[in-house]
Image: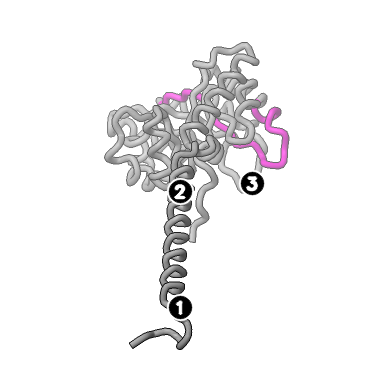
Amino acid sequence: MTNHRPGSDFAPRAGYLWRARRLSLAAVLTSDLFRVLQLKMTEPVPSARLPCARLDEIQARMAAAARAAGRDPAEVRLVAVSKQQPWESIEPILVAGQTTFGENRVQEAMERWGGRREGLTLHLIGPLQTNKAAEAAAFFDVIETLDRPKLARVLATEIQKAGCAPRLYVQINTGEEPQKAGVVPAEADGFIAECLGLGLQIEGLMCIPPVDEEPAMHFALLAKIAARNGLSKLSMGMSDDFETAIRFGATSVRVGSALFGARLAKA
């Protein structure tokens, strides 16, 4: 029994040839696609997408800014702001050698770093509630947001109880913005003296300039307040202005989005 039209003796052969050509074409396309994928897999990833490359770039910019200001680059420390970042974004930076990180919340920091604490320096750079003061004093190496008398008194008590000695920075609200934490400049000297009177070891000052103002004048003001109070450390400058901050004497800069990329919005 035949499966072709009468009079078409070559129809079966033509059908076989057509199917063979189709299979051959599919094999060629599959092979080409495989080669393309291989090339894509071996192509270098653009450096802008590599966390390690971003770290190197920021460190190079910090060093250049320090040298341009006649300073030793080693005087300026990078605080990698890891708050609200997923671990897969943080780990490559950690593996690349970054050891100083900044966190906004006590609980989040303890959950993230509790089992990875060794060899790291952790800064609390977010507002501190008095009911979290004991945990913060025991967990963080540096607390940058000392900003009111009640918190100063509670920290003094908790530090004495625990026998720990985190380094402390007073946060100055240089822009006198009502929505921001921090001591206003006119009250800074008195507050620093009050903290010292409580036995707190104040190492430096921190500020966050208003987003719609030139940061340089705020950095200059912070440096002036620190100088007249005999404080040597200045935490100022973030992703958009850290080079300017270094020019005005920053000893640490807090860089987040330029290092890790934008934080994911909370659902």
Q: In this figure, which residue is indicated by the disc labeled 2?
A: 37
Q: In this figure, which residue is indicated by the disc labeled 1?
A: 11
* CA gap, disc 1 and disc 2: 39 Å
Labels in figure, total: 3
Say which residue appears at 42% left-offset and 24% top-offset. 201
Query: Mark 2: which secondary structure?
Result: helix
Query: Mark 1: which secondary structure?
Result: helix
Label 1, residues with CA under 10 Å away: few <14, some 14-19, many ≥20:
some
Which picture quadrant has residue 218?
A: top right
Q: Position of residue 141 (x, y in %)?
A: 38, 30
The residue under label 3 is which amino acid type? Answer: Pro
* Magenta run includes residue 14: no
Q: Position of residue 252 (x, y in %)?
A: 52, 26
* Magenta extent: 200-219
Res. 205 in view: no
Q: Earlier in the sequence, mark 1 or mark 2?
A: 1
* CA gap, disc 1 and disc 3: 88 Å
Q: Earlier in the sequence, mark 3 or mark 2?
A: 2
The residue under label 1 is which amino acid type? Answer: Ala
Say which residue appears at 58% left-offset and 24% top-offset. 61
Q: In this figure, which residue is indicated by the disc labeled 3?
A: 178
Describe residue 81's horizontal placement relative to residue 215 as left or right: left
Front in this rendered view, residue 262 or 220: 262
Kindly indicate whether the residue at mark 2 contacts the one at mark 3 (C-beta within 8 angstroms).
no
> Which tag is nearer the camera, tag 1 or tag 3?
1
The circle on residue 57 is none
The residue under label 2 is which amino acid type? Answer: Leu
Which picture quadrant has residue 157?
A: top left
Say which residue appears at 52% left-offset and 55% top-offset. 265
> Which tag is nearer the camera, tag 3 or tag 2?
2
Label 2, residues with CA under 10 Å away: few <14, some 14-19, many ≥20:
few
Which picture quadrant has residue 206?
A: top right
